[in-house]
Every structure is written in C-alpha cells, then in structure tokens.
C-alpha cells in the first residue's frame, strides 16, 4: 500500500477525532494485515539480503584469515561497549511519542550530540587498546570511531517510515545498507586491506541506507535548537539506549570475553561462527522488531489483547527458529567441511553450539518489543541484561576450560536460559494457558534436538547428518502442528493467501 495514501488517510481520520487504535483496526486487514504486510516486506527483503550476505561471507572467508576476522570483530566488539550513546533508540522514542512533525527537527540536534559523544568515546579506546597489549587494534578503532558520524540522520529518517507503517521502504533501506556493507567489505578484502575491510565497509552502509530514505521521503526538518524539547527527548532516549546497548552486546560481549582468554585466530573462529549462526535469527526474528514495536504500541489501550498478541508472536517465532536453528546445528559441521577452506573447519562445531543457544531468541525479541511499546524501560533493561551477562560469563569460563568450543557451549547455555527467563514478565495465567501449545512442543523439540546433536550426529558424513536432520524436521514440524490451537495453522494458510492482503 502506498505510504502517502496511508499518511493522508490517517491524518484525515485523526482530524475527525478518531483514535489511533480505531483507525488502524478498521484499515485493510486491521492489525493482522499490518503485521503480515510488514513481515512480508521485512522477511522478503531480508531473505534477499541474506542471500547477498551469504555469498559475500563465502568470498570473505576465502580471502581473509581467521586472524583478520578476529582483529576486526574484536575492534567492533570493543566499540560496542561505548554504545550507551547510540542513537538507534531515538527512533523508537519518536514512534512512541507520536509527535514526529513537532519533534523531528530537535531530534536531529539530539542525534548529532549523541553521535559526537560516541565518536569521541570510541576514539579514546584506541590508546587504551595499546595499554591492554592489543596494538593491532589502534587504527581499526579510529576508523570505527569515524564511521559513527555517518549515522547522524538514520534514527530520525527511520522513525518517519515506522510511524507511517511504511515497512516496505524501511526494508528496502535495510537491504541496501547491508548489501553495500558486504559488497564493499569483499572489495576491500580483495584489495588486500585485511581486517580493515570490515571496518571501512561500515561507512557506505550508513550513508546508502540514509540516502535511500531521503530520496523517498525528503530531508528531515532542520530547526534552531530548543533546549527544553531536546531535554524531554534526551531522558527516554538515554534510558532506552541503555537497553539497546545491552542488545548489541548480546553478540559483541561474548566475543570480547573470548578475546580476553584466547588468541586472535580463536576469536576469528568464534566471531565468524556467531555471525553465521545468527543469520537465521536475524532473518526470521530480529528483523521483525521494526514491525512489532509500532504495532504493539498501538494496542496499549487493550492490555489483554496486547499480551495475547505477544504470546502469539512468541509461539510463531519459536516454532520457526527451533526448526531452522536445529537444522543449522545438525548440518553445520558437514557444510563447513565441504564448502569452506580448511583454515575455517574448526568453526563448524562452534556454529552448531551457538545455533542451539539461539532457538529461543523469538521469546526475548517479542517480550522486548512489548516492554518497549509499554514504556517499561527498567524491565526492558533487565530483560536484555540477563542473556548478555550469562552468555559472556559462561563463554569466558568455557574458553578457559575447553577453548573455542567451550566458549561456544557456554554462550549457548547462557543465551537460552536468559531468553526463557524473560517470560517472567508475562502474567502467569497467560503462560499457563499456553502450556500445551508452547511449552510442551518447546520441551519436546529441545530434547529431541539435543539427543540428535550429542548422541547420533557425531559423524560428519552427509548420509547420517541428512537422515537425522530429516527425522528432527518431521518430529519438530509434527509437534508444533498437532499441538497447535489454530494460530500456526492460520499463519501458514494466510501465507499461501498473501496476495489477498495486497488487494
């Protein structure tokens, strides 16, 4: 649906005194239609983008060494520890407040201040890296620091598309950003820039994504700064930035902790394995954050319906992730051994372990989007902190005991436990109602996956791994299907009828 039509229809009906929730409920397909269309565009372009990214990653592992990958990702991980000044949360604040036209101009000033602060803090890490004995990271950190300046307009531009539910062009912007990153990374690697390939590619990623939105929607308004309004935006932005900071650390903190215990080559195995394992999660779950938070926020007037929507989302995401991540875990070793150079073969088991830890990410993402929409920033903070701390600590001690595979196993246990514990904020009566349709199939699938992983799929022969993967697929799919109360069945049926939504 055309974004200008949506915006015009919304403004007309709003001027007639109709509430937000009624406007969107009574639109084509209601909220289900909005979520489905948003998911369609996000997953569609994310699938296309991940295809491009996968090809790029294959090229990178043939060109770069594990040490190159380890140095670049260690620099990125260190820079993420300064991420409490990240501007990404400003976009959600603008969406939640619902006064974009009045506040966008001042948001540009706030974004500029936060970006400059982040740039300075990351630059300060460069001399600190020398003191820590990692002199190879000095210039890498300086480049990462400079690249943050390219993100000044990104949160303000993205908020405009989210408010208008224009998920199509938001998905296109993300696709262009990620594709340009991997394309330039491969180009720089081919030019012989080694670890600098990955950090230099961060510059075109932000610029190209922002340029597309500006081309579609125009520049954000530029005004003289109004300190009082900037202060009003600053407080919720910083509060939410702390949570987003922890979210970004979910991958980066374990990499940093592993770097404290192991060498650069081992960091390369671990960081690359994490990147590969998380592609499925990004495609099927993380990428839907753009859709979930704005939609959940429109349901704030009806708490029961909102929690019901959260639980439906959790169930749908978990069903998809436990199947896809499970297959990824079972097939990782033979795939890496067959299609990647010998220097990367030790990363195969690491991918398997991390994939197991990511099967419950749909729970964390859905609960986080709900808490964000409700403005429960303190609960949101603790929800995202637990998986980060658990995965990082267990990864560090696992690395000390069993090397890179021990680090992966520790991170997987910490992630899975932290994700499941995030359900504590859902009312118990609602969780109890979902025992048969969510907790029971989750338990059956998790048990069967661990049995296949640890006792039957130890061989790296293709025949055995494919056999047990197909067996797991049948068990998992059947369990979710026959214990479902109609939610997943309707989701599958509606996907076959997707064309009706776009009429």
Image: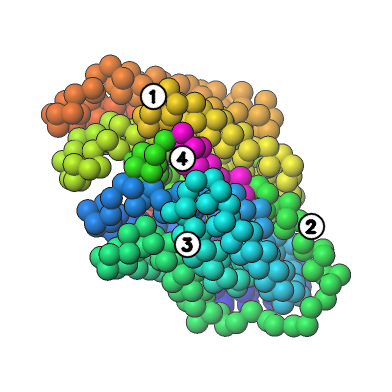
Q: Earlier in the sequence, mark 2 or mark 1?
A: 2
Q: Quadrant of the C terminus?
A: bottom left
Disc 2 and disc 3: Cα gap in Å?
33 Å
The picture places residue 329, in percent across and down from the top left corner, at 32, 33
Residue holding disc 4:
259
Q: Which residue is mark 2?
A: 235
The crowding category of the residue bearing disc 2, from other C-alpha atoms within 10 Å (few below 14, some 14 to 19, many at least 20), is few
Q: Residue furthest right?
A: 228
- The circle on residue 139 is 3
Q: Earlier in the sequence, mark 4 or mark 1?
A: 4
Closer to the observer: label 3 or label 1? Answer: 3
Does 184 sit left or right of 311 as displayed? left
Residue linked to disc 1: 402
Q: Looking at the image, which residue is at 54% across and 68% down?
A: 146
For the residue pair 111 and 401, the one nearer the viewer reads as: 401
User: Separation of disc 3 and disc 4 at Cα?
Assistant: 18 Å
- The stretch in magenta equals 244-261
Percent position (x, y) of residue 251?
Answer: 49, 43
């Amino acid at each position: 649906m055309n974004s200008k039509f949506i915006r015009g229809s919304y403004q007309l009906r709003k001027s007639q005194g109709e509430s937000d929730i009624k406007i969107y409920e009574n639109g084509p397909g209601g909220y289900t239609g909005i979520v489905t269309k948003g998911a369609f565009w996000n997953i569609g372009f994310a699938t296309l983008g991940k295809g491009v990214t996968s090809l790029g990653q294959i090229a990178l592992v043939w060109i770069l060494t594990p040490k190159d990958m380890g140095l670049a990702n260690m620099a990125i991980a260190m820079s993420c520890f300064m991420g409490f000044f990240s501007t990404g949360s400003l976009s959600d604040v603008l969406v939640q407040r619902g006064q974009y036209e009045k506040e966008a101009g001042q948001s540009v000033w706030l974004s500029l201040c936060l970006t400059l602060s982040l740039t300075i803090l990351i630059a300060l890490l460069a001399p600190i890296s020398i003191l820590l004995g990692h002199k190879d990271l000095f210039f890498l950190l300086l480049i990462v620091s400079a690249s943050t300046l390219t993100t000044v307009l990104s949160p303000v531009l993205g908020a405009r598309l989210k408010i208008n539910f224009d998920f199509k062009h938001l998905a296109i912007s993300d696709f262009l950003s990620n594709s340009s990153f991997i394309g330039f990374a491969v180009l720089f690697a081919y030019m012989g820039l080694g670890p600098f390939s990955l950090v230099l590619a961060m510059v075109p990623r932000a610029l190209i994504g922002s340029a597309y939105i500006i081309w579609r929607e125009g520049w954000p308004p530029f005004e003289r700064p109004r300190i009082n309004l900037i202060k009003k935006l600053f407080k919720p932005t910083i509060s939410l930035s702390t949570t987003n900071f922890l979210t970004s650390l979910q991958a980066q903190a374990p990499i940093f902790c592993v770097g404290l215990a192991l060498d650069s080559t081992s960091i390369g195995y671990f960081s690359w394995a994490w990147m590969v394992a998380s592609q499925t999660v990004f495609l099927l779950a993380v990428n839907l954050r753009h859709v979930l938070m704005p939609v959940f926020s429109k349901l704030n007037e009806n708490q029961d319906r909102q929690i019901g929507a959260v639980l439906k989302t959790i169930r749908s995401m978990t069903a998809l992730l436990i199947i896809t991540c499970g297959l990824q875990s079972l097939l990782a070793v033979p795939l890496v051994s067959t299609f990647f150079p010998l220097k990367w073969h030790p990363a195969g088991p690491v991918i398997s372990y991390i994939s197991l830890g990511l099967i419950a990410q749909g729970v964390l993402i859905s609960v986080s989007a709900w808490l964000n929409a409700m403005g429960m920033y303190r609960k949101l903070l603790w929800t995202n902190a637990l998986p980060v701390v658990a995965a990082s600590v267990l990864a560090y001690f696992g690395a000390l005991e069993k090397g890179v595979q021990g680090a992966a196993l520790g991170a997987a246990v910490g992630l899975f436990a932290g994700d499941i514990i995030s359900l504590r904020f859902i009312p118990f009566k609602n969780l109890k109602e979902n025992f048969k349709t969510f907790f029971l199939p989750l338990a059956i699938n998790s048990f069967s996956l661990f049995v296949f992983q640890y006792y039957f799929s130890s061989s790296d022969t293709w025949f055995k791994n494919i056999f047990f993967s197909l067996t797991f697929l049948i068990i998992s799919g059947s369990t979710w299907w026959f214990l479902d109360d109609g939610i997943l069945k309707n989701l599958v049926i509606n996907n076959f009828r997707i064309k009706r939504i776009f009429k």
